[in-house]
């Protein structure tokens, strides 16, 4: 959630972490904070560990780390613990009306993994 009370979805590689400063900058906010676990289910319809950028109760502006463009396919949560969907990153961008952005901690390309 941003300092303005707005919610966003950020998709980062499994080996990375969301860089809160970069995330805030990309949405024009002063700060961004992760939502509390107890707020996740009522807000998104998903539990911790099974949250997917698809099928949330509401549509939120979504940003995918730019390293996803380097892969033919990436894996992401299918909405339940242990289930994944594998798809081309541009497909995800199109369906979610998302944008590629530099939102993750600094990593070398060989360290960036998209969990497949």
Image (cartoon, rainbow, N blue to C red):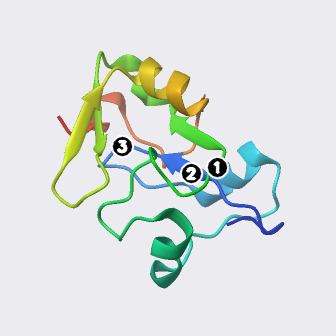
x and y percentages locating residue 68 in the rendered image = 41, 27
Between the C-alphas of marks 1 and 2, the distance is: 6 Å
Would you identify the image quadrant in which residue 30 lies?
bottom right
Residue at image position (45%, 65%) is 45
Q: Which residue is mark 2?
A: 9
Q: Which residue is mark 3?
A: 13
| Local SS, label 1 | loop
Residue at image position (32%, 19%) is 71
Along the line of sight, which residue is nearer the eye, 113 or 76? 76
Whichever of callouts 1 and 2 sits on the residue coming sooner in the sequence is 2
Between the C-alphas of marks 2 and 3, the distance is: 13 Å
Whichever of callouts 1 and 3 sits on the residue coming sooner in the sequence is 3
Q: Is residue 109 left or right of residue 10?
A: left
Residue at image position (22%, 43%) is 84
x and y percentages locating residue 51 in the rendered image = 38, 58
- For label 3, count other residues whose C-alpha is less than 10 Å away and answer few (under 14), some (14-19) or many (20+): many
Q: Which residue is mark 1?
A: 60
Pointers 1 and 2 in contact (CB under 8 A)? yes
Tag in front: 1 or 3: 1
Residue at image position (56%, 73%) is 35
Vertical placement of residue 25 versus 64, above or below: below
Tag in front: 1 or 2: 1
Between the C-alphas of marks 1 and 3, the distance is: 19 Å
x and y percentages locating residue 18 in the rendered image = 50, 54
Along the line of sight, which residue is nearer the eye, 46 or 1? 46
x and y percentages locating residue 75 in the rendered image = 27, 36
- What is the tally of numbered marks visible in this picture? 3
Would you identify the image quadrant in which residue 1 lies?
bottom right
Tag in front: 2 or 3: 2
């Amino acid at each position: 959630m941003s300092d303005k009370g707005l919610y966003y979805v950020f998709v980062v590689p499994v080996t990375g972490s969301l860089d809160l400063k970069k995330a805030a900058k990309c949405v024009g906010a002063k700060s961004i904070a992760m939502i509390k676990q107890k707020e996740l289910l009522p807000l998104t319809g998903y539990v911790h560990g099974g949250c997917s950028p698809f099928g949330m109760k509401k549509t939120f502006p979504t940003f995918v780390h730019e390293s996803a463009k380097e892969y033919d396919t990436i894996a992401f949560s299918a909405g339940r613990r242990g289930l994944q969907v594998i798809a081309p990153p541009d497909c995800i961008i199109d369906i979610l009306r998302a944008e590629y952005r530099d939102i993750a901690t600094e990593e070398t390309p060989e360290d960036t993994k998209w969990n497949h």
